[in-house]
Image (cartoon, coloured by chain):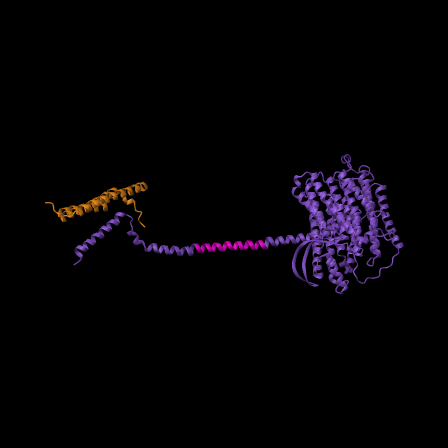
Chain colours: A purple, B orange
């Protein structure tokens, strides 16, 4: 079977699953719904794996397969920077190393999370609704990463945004969930605005929206001297696209929706708000790497924003008490790492971290879901503790996930994070400050992740008596995905070994996509392996320090709120309240928008309604006048005519008595007159 | 000797009585009967002149008039009955539908 020509089926399976579950799910059994949803994703995974296996067998230069199904739309000629160009968009799918990585991550982890959800969501109402949305999400996400042009990507981009909204608001009867869903949707709109501007500018500048064509034309333009490094138009495009990426991938200043998105069910947090959807921005920037290469200033913005987001989110994560919120801020922080990598030109490193992060963050979220499941929907770590022996599988898998994210040498997170840190320092756009921020964040990551682990599984039990009796390990459908993901977190890093250990197969695989443009570059400083090992050792040491601190504060001594508050001093309320960013946004934007809405409402109710009511009043008044005119003038004339005729006809009327005898009498008299005339009248 | 003149006088008298009856009486039945009187006055006229001129057409006409009168009486009485049913009166003064 030629899987390469069947890649269009990959997004289609979940779409069919969505239609079946969405239309008939209510009447089907929960088992059937779950089997259809998970089965659709499994089929996608099998086809993805088949296609990627066949792709790998091709020559590295030929590893790019486009499958165009039909022309989606064509609006004819348009004027662009390249002269007239036809604005024609194909419904096509592109499989190259980058999308290969993405579809494997999306379908693989997506399938595990579908299986997990069958167990986790079993007691919930609207079971079929959940799986229908989840399948719709898989369809959108696969369209996003497989689409062969920017507009296909945009469909997927909007689709995942919609599913995110639907799934955050899954518990729609809770006001907080509804608010969080709306917040996610509105904040993402800001990003989508940037993305759509970027796509339009790409077409206007280059004359195409097909990924391959744009890449080729940019390449030719650079060779022909048409496009230059730091061209303002490319800086604008790159920044506009980054606004989109910041919205979807939760970077400063648009990260605020992601922590609130934890109102959704935990599998959703794992699949959408940690492992796959939020990496769409990373994918999009990597996909547009040829544009970013022409805009080093924009790349610097990306790197700085990424580094600051990593630091900022990690600092908030230090003191959060909700188990899912810690993971949410951790996600934001890790996404910051990815953008730091993209910003310094290490696209492959960013995508590598995307992949490893997908494993361990999905694992951690599903693990936290398992804890929440065991604790009967308790999410507050202050009421957990000493769960290690009660739910051992969850503990051990989460322990592996924590080790991986903290950058323990040998696990997935270590390789990808270290690659990013090294490139942040060593690449031509890198800087020691970026490395330093990254390293500090690595320490903070280790600290807050072990704080989570210790507060949840070690120390004294703070579980209330009633719940404590019912703590139980999750069913197999939940623990098996955890185990698989834990295995992934252990070994996924070995496909991208650092240079001092071996060859980075992952980077090599992605090379055709991230082909450098023929532009002048500053000579990269020569760096020795020794330097790299040294830097790695320093970052590991910092992470170890974070671990040690967490160990002494939360494991040696059990957690106490008073002590924690005292130790942070005045910083504590600021950290706990997320640096008051939500309050700031409320004051700056939300309340302004509400005020603008209120004043528009006033304008509407006073001016617009006033005009309408005024015109109604005028109509009524003029109708009264018109009716008076009609009654007295028009009718008056008619009656006057009638009256005159009536008066004049009065004498004649008297003749008409209506009595037959009167008429007969007149007849007789007339006859007599005639007779008289005949007898005596004539001479 | 009864001459044509006498017949004519009788006829004129009868006719005049009929006319006065039609013009003065208020009962619609009486008016119809007065009309019969006028018609029979005409019949006498026809027969008188038929006798004087020794022609049979006078008598023929008279019989013709009687026949038509019978038909007229039938129609007239039908109208009267229909009117009585609607107006419940025989008084011609109460029947003034022909006034404007």
**Front one among A497 and A541:** A497
**Residue drawn at x 32%, y 56% as measured from the top left:** A648
Task: Give above or below for A131 relative to A73.
Answer: above
Task: Give left or right: position of A559 versus A159.
Answer: right
Q: Nearer the viewer, residue A559 or A456?
A: A456
Predominant secondary structure, magenta span? helix
* Residue A493 at x, y percent in the picture: 82, 48
Is residue A307 something that shows in the picture? Answer: no
Is residue A69 visible to the viewer in this orientation of the structure?
A: yes
Where does residue B16 sit, x and y in percent of width and height? 19, 47
In the picture, residue A292 is in which quadrant? bottom right
The quadrant of the image that shows the C terminus of chain A is bottom left
Total marks placed: 0
Q: Residue furthest left?
A: B1
- Tell which residue pokes out farthest to the front in this image: A1
Q: Residue visible at 85% across and 44% down?
A: A551
> Residue A94, image x and y in percent?
73, 53
Q: Residue furthest right?
A: A530
Write the start and end of the magenta stretch as one range.
A607-630
Magenta span includes B88: no
Percent across and percent down for residue A240 are 72, 57
Q: Is residue A613 magenta?
A: yes
Q: Viewed as shown, does residue A116 lie left or right of B59?
A: right
Quadrant assignment, res A39? top right
């Amino acid at each position: 079977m030629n899987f390469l020509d069947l890649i269009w089926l990959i997004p289609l399976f979940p779409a069919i699953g969505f239609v079946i579950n969405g239309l008939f799910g209510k009447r089907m059994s929960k088992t059937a719904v779950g089997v259809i949803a998970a089965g659709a994703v499994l089929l996608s995974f099998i086809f993805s794996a088949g296609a990627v296996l066949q792709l790998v067998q091709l020559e590295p230069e030929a590893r790019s397969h486009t499958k165009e199904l039909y022309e989606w739309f064509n609006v004819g000629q348009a004027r662009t920077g390249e002269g007239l160009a036809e604005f024609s968009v194909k419904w096509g799918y592109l499989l190259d190393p980058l999308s290969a990585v993405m579809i494997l991550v999306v379908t693989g982890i997506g399938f595990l999370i579908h299986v997990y959800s069958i167990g986790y969501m079993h007691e919930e109402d609207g079971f079929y609704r959940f799986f229908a949305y989840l399948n719709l999400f898989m369809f959108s996400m696969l369209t996003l990463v497989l689409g062969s042009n920017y507009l296909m990507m945009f469909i997927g981009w909007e689709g995942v945004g919609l599913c995110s909204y639907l799934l955050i608001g899954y518990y729609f009867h809770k006001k907080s969930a509804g608010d969080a869903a709306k917040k996610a949707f509105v904040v993402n709109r800001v990003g989508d605005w940037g993305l759509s501007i970027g796509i339009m500018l790409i077409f206007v500048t280059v004359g195409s929206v097909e990924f391959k064509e744009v890449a080729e034309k940019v390449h030719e333009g650079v060779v022909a001297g048409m496009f230059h490094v730091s061209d303002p138009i490319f800086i604008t495009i790159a920044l506009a696209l980054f606004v989109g990426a910041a919205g979807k991938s939760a970077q400063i200043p648009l990260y605020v929706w992601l922590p609130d998105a934890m109102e959704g069910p935990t599998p959703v947090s794992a699949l959408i708000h940690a492992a796959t959807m939020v990496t769409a921005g990373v994918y999009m920037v990597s996909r547009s790497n040829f544009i970013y290469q022409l805009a080093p200033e924009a790349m610097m913005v990306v790197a700085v924003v990424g580094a600051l987001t990593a630091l900022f989110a990690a600092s908030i994560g230090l003191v959060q008490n909700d188990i899912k919120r810690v993971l949410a801020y951790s996600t934001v922080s890790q996404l910051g790492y990815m953008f730091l990598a993209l910003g310094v030109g290490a696209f492959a490193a960013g995508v590598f971290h995307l992949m490893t992060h997908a494993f361990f963050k999905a694992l951690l979220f599903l693990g936290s879901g398992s804890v929440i499941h065991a604790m009967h929907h308790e999410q507050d770590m202050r009421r957990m503790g000493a769960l290690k022996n009660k739910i051992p599988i969850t503990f051990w898998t989460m322990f592996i996930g924590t080790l991986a994210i903290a950058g323990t040498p040998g696990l997935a997170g270590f390789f990808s994070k270290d690659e990013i840190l090294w490139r942040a320092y060593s690449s031509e756009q890198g800087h020691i400050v970026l490395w330093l921020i990254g390293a500090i964040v690595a320490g903070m990551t280790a600290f807050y992740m072990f704080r989570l682990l210790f507060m949840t599984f070690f120390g004294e039990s703070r579980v209330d008596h009633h719940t404590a009796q019912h703590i139980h390990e999750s069913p197999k459908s939940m623990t098996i995905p955890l185990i698989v993901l834990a295995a992934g977190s252990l070994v996924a890093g070995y496909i991208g070994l650092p240079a001092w250990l071996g060859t980075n197969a992952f980077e090599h695989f992605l090379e055709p996509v991230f082909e450098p443009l023929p532009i002048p570059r500053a000579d990269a400083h020569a760096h020795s392996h020794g330097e790299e090992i040294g830097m790695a050792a320093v970052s590991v040491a910092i992470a170890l320090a974070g671990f040690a601190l967490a160990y002494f504060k939360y494991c040696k001594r059990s957690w106490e709120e008073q002590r924690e508050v005292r130790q942070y001093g005045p910083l504590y309320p600021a950290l706990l309240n997320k640096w008051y960013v939500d309050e700031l946004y409320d004051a700056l934007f939300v309340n302004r928008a509400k005020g603008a809405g209120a004043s528009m409402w006033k304008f509407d109710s006073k001016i617009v309604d006033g005009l309408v009511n005024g015109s109604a009043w005028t109509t009524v008044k003029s109708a009264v006048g018109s009716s008076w005119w009609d009654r007295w003038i028009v009718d008056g004339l008619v009656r006057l005519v009638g009256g005159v005729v009536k008066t004049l006809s009065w004498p004649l009327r008297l003749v008409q008595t209506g009595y037959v005898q009167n008429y007969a009498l007149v007849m007789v008299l007339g006859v007599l007159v005639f007779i008289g005339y005949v007898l005596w009248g004539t001479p | 000797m009864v001459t044509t003149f006498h017949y004519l006088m009788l006829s004129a008298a009868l006719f005049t009585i009929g006319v006065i009856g039609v013009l003065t009486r208020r009962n619609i039945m009486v008016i119809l009967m007065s009309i019969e009187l006028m018609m029979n006055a005409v019949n006498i006229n026809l027969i008188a002149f038929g006798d004087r001129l020794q022609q049979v057409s006078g008598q023929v006409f008279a019989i013709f008039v009687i026949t038509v009168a019978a038909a007229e009486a039938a129609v007239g009485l039908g109208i009267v009955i229909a009117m009585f049913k609607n107006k419940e009166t025989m008084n011609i003064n109460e029947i003034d539908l022909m006034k404007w």
